[in-house]
Amino acid sequence: MLKELNPILHSQLRLAIISILMSVEEADFVFLKGQTNATAGNLSVQIDKLLSAGYITVEKSFVGKKTRTTCRITTLGEKAFEEYVNTLKSYLKLT
């Protein structure tokens, strides 16, 4: 019997965010928006969902008068991503 894919990571945008964060130390909102071509509103909602799941941390700071939102993947997020990829491989019979 096949294991269910993680519904939190199965969203295209959330999976894109996590995939990006797996390859960088941190990424700010502007970078993630540019990489994913998401609207600011949709990106913000998906970041909140990943934050609520404990998969990322979010730090808000100011650069001059502008707010800077920086995201980092957590150990839990890394494990969830690796498990998601392994489950996907089992679907494709790659493991």
Image (spheres, grey):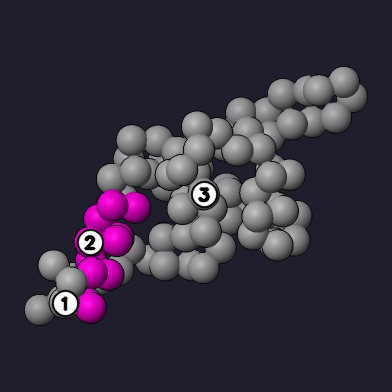
Q: Assess disc 2: are there few (<14), some (14-19) or many (≥20) residues with their C-alpha within 10 Å of its C-alpha.
A: some
- Mark number for residue 93? 1
Residue shown at 13%/67% (left/top)? 95
What segment carries the magenta color?
Answer: 81-92
Residue shown at 28%/52% (left/top)? 82
Residue annotated with mark 3: 20
Position above or below: 44 against 75:
below
Question: What kind of residue is marked 2?
Answer: Asn
Q: Is residue 44 visible?
A: no
Question: What kind of residue is marked 3?
Answer: Ile
Question: What kind of residue is marked 1?
Answer: Lys
Q: Is residue 68 visible?
A: yes
Residue shown at 55%/33% (left/top)? 26
Magenta stretch, main secondary structure, is: helix
In whole angstroms, how far apart are the C-alphas of marks 3 and 2?
A: 18 Å
Quarter of the image where one finds residue 88? bottom left
